[in-house]
Image: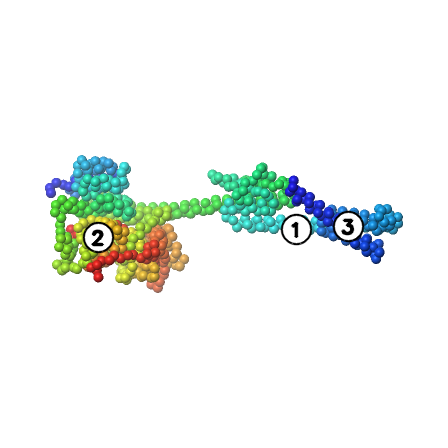
């Protein structure tokens, strides 16, 4: 047991030897000074090594020093010299008093010191606990909680090795952490304790140490450590399951708003189509050509609307799943915008449309179809919210390394708190029943513009509501190359 | 031509087949139908159609494969009809030999127009090719390299004419960016879509009445261009 020797026996020997040496030194000094000193003063001075030994080396060295000084005093200073015999009654009394004083004094000092030691120990325990708790409380995942618990236990209790096993959690493999990290323990663990909270057994902690026995203080502190560790592990687990619940709730909420919105939006055109077709089929009425034509136009328009909705839903699911990858090539923004305007001519006829695209606008690396979709959605939004007869303005400008496009309409201003949220899925300012649409259009725009590396936002300006978006003009850090045509010069 | 043209429909959706059969028969076409790619190819061999209408999603082969296989031995016009609306599939189909495509749902007028173009095109490739092409007030003489509007000559650069001539030689058909770049600038330049943007822009300024609303040189979003004749 070399370690036991080193840690326990050697200090003990050292302390007693020191006490003995201290007494011997005092005896020698007093013997030299004896002719000048009275016997009472010598007795008084002999109390010094007792006090020093008790203060410096503890209770037992103190008592040993007390007994030794008693003997030395008797042997060297009480006549007859160099024997332990005592002839005078007076000397006997002073020796007895000396012995009592030495022993009582060393006891008193020793107790005070012990009390102080206990207080220090308590304070140290409290510091350790505080450090552990504050380290644990800031952690957000089980692995680092377990790691912290293991390393603190290792350090505080002078363990050779600590291993924490977390076995709780359905379907998860057990979490196993060793401290010091990356090493393996040898032999059987000295101490095994469960990591338990009031509700669940979270796992266990295994410790290896040469001195298997824990002192009373150590086991009290260790218990507190393990309780804190178990609580922290439980907290992480509960937070995780709460987060999972929240995500589920949110996606549930999204699904139900999707269903609400979609079922309303899909059913209306279906209802119109069904009504028109069944009227045309029923022989009850003899439809004149105009009425017939009206019904057929309704059917066609509503079919287009359904197709548009399905397209929107598909786009959204592509954006959601991260499958939206723009097929970028060099495109002229004005060409895309004008293509969309030509297609939407009929819907735009109740608004005054103005287009301001400068002639020198650079080509922009874009997915033609996706950016077309952005223009379609922003324009149909402007048509929907801008009252009939008002202006819709499209403008673009080249600003450094991006092209800045604005779609302005004269809809009523939107409250500041809605401005960023209108690009969220299913977010609408008005009630779903009052305006048509799935509430997806703007979020699709956002998805597309962001996939292009641009930004989209909305703003109230005096008299106008403005959608802004930007697109970078460079593709992988390069500008388009233009061909050389000899006859162009 | 007194015989009604034969159209082969390769599509596995019974509703679409039923609707198309009814509509096409009413428009004086003969119809043959196949529900799988293999069947379609077999029918095309057994009874060569004048036009094939092909769905891309088939139970056995992919429509693009069907296109490729038919192209190994036949020049019959193929119109692709599909719910797939991403540009990659459309370009792949066109590059593998399809003449045109339509995305489902489609308007029947559009389909009939595309069928007429396809039929006209196959007649032309049999007989002698037209060298003068008219689009609106613009007339292009491919043999004499003259472009004019209302008998007034329009001056084009060499590249502009080469581009216009290639588009006009395939009237009313979609030409992919790659195909055009490959033909006009050569194989090494076929990724430079920006060339096309520049030159098509220049051509529109010279040819179109209102370059902002082109009537002759139409953009096929994400795919290429189509030269639209007045017919």
Question: In the rendered image, which quarter contains the N terminus of chain B?
Answer: top left
Q: Residues within 10 Å of mark 1 (few under 14, many from 20)?
A: few
Q: What residue is pinned by disc 1? A: A120
Label 3: chain letter: A
Q: Which residue is rendered at x = 21% and y = 41% of the image? A: B71
- Marks 3, 2: nearer the viewer: 3
| Residue B175 in the figure: left or right of residue A437 | left
Q: What residue is pinned by disc 3? A: A24
Could you tell me residue A116's position as x and y percent? 69, 51
Which residue is more in the foreground, A377 or A301? Answer: A377
Both on one chain, marks 1 and 2? no
Both on one chain, marks 3 and 2? no
Q: Secondary structure at mark 1?
A: helix
Mark 1 vs mark 2, CA separation in Å: 91 Å
Label 2: chain letter: B
Could you tell me residue A315's position as x and y percent? 33, 48
Circle on res. A461: none
Q: Which residue is rendered at x = 81% and y = 49% of the image? A: A72
């Amino acid at each position: 047991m070399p370690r036991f020797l080193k840690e326990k026996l050697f200090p003990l020997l050292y302390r007693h030897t020191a006490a003995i040496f201290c007494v011997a030194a005092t005896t020698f000094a007093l013997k030299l000074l004896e002719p000048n000193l009275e016997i009472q003063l010598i007795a008084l001075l002999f109390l010094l090594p007792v006090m020093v030994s008790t203060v410096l080396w503890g209770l037992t060295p103190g008592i040993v020093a007390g007994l030794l000084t008693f003997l030395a005093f008797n042997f060297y200073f009480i006549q007859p010299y160099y024997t332990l015999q005592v002839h005078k009654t007076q000397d006997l009394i002073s020796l007895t008093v000396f012995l009592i004083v030495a022993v009582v004094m060393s006891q008193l000092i020793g107790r005070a010191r012990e009390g102080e030691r206990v207080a220090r120990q308590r304070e140290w325990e409290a510091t350790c606990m505080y450090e552990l708790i504050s380290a644990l409380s800031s952690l957000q995942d089980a692995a680092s909680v377990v790691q912290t618990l293991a390393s603190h236990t290792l350090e505080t209790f002078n363990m050779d090795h600590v291993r924490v096993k977390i076995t709780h959690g359905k379907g998860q493999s057990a979490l196993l952490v060793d401290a010091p990290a990356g090493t393996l323990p040898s032999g059987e663990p000295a101490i095994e304790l469960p990591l338990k909270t009031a509700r669940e057994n979270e796992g266990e902690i295994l410790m290896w140490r040469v001195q298997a026995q824990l002192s009373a203080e150590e086991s009290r502190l260790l218990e507190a450590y393990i309780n804190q560790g178990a609580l922290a592990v439980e907290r992480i687990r509960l937070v995780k399951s709460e987060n999972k619940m929240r995500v589920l709730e949110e996606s549930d909420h999204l699904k139900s708003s999707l269903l609400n919105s979609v079922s309303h939006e899909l059913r209306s055109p279906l209802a119109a189509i069904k009504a028109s077709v069944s009227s045309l089929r029923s022989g009850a009425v003899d439809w004149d050509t105009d009425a017939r034509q009206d019904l057929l136009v309704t059917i066609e328009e509503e079919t287009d609307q359904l197709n548009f909705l399905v397209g929107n839903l598909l786009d959204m699911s592509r954006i959601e799943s991260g499958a939206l990858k723009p097929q970028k090539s060099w495109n002229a923004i004005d060409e895309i915008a004008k293509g969309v305007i030509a297609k939407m001519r009929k819907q735009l006829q109740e608004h005054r449309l103005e287009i301001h695209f400068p002639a020198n606008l650079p080509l922009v690396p874009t997915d033609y179809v996706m950016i077309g979709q952005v223009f379609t959605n922003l324009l149909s939004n402007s048509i929907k919210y801008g009252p009939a007869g008002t202006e819709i303005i499209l403008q673009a400008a080249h600003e450094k390394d991006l092209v800045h496009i604005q779609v302005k309409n004269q809809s009523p201003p939107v409250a500041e708190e809605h401005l960023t949220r209108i690009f969220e899925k299913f977010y609408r300012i008005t009630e779903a029943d009052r305006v048509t649409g799935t509430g997806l259009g703007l979020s699709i725009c956002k998805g597309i513009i962001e996939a292009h590396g641009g930004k989209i936002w909305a703003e109230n300006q005096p008299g106008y509501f403005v959608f802004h978006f930007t697109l970078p003009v460079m593709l992988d850090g390069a500008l388009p190359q233009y061909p050389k045509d000899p006859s162009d010069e | 031509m007194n015989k009604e043209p034969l159209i082969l429909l390769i599509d596995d959706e019974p509703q679409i087949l039923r609707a198309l059969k009814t509509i096409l028969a009413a428009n004086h076409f003969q119809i043959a139908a196949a529900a799988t790619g293999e069947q379609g190819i077999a029918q095309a061999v057994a009874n060569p159609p004048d036009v094939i209408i092909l769905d891309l999603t088939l139970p056995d082969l992919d429509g693009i494969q069907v296109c490729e296989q038919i192209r190994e031995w036949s020049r019959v016009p193929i119109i692709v009809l599909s719910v797939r609306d991403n540009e990659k599939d459309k370009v792949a189909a066109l590059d593998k030999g399809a003449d045109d495509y339509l995305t489902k749902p489609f308007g029947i007028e559009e389909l009939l127009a595309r069928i007429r173009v396809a039929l006209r095109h196959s007649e032309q490739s049999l007989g002698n090719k037209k060298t003068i092409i008219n689009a609106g007030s613009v007339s292009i003489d491919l043999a004499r390299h003259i472009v004019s509007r209302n008998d007034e000559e329009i001056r084009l650069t060499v590249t502009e004419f080469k581009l216009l001539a290639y588009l006009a030689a395939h009237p009313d058909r979609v030409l992919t960016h790659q195909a055009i770049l490959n033909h006009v600038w050569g194989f090494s330049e076929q990724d430079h879509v920006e060339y096309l943007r520049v030159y098509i822009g220049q051509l529109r300024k010279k040819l179109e009445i209102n370059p902002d609303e082109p009537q002759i040189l139409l953009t096929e979003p994400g795919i290429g261009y189509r030269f639209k004749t007045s017919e």
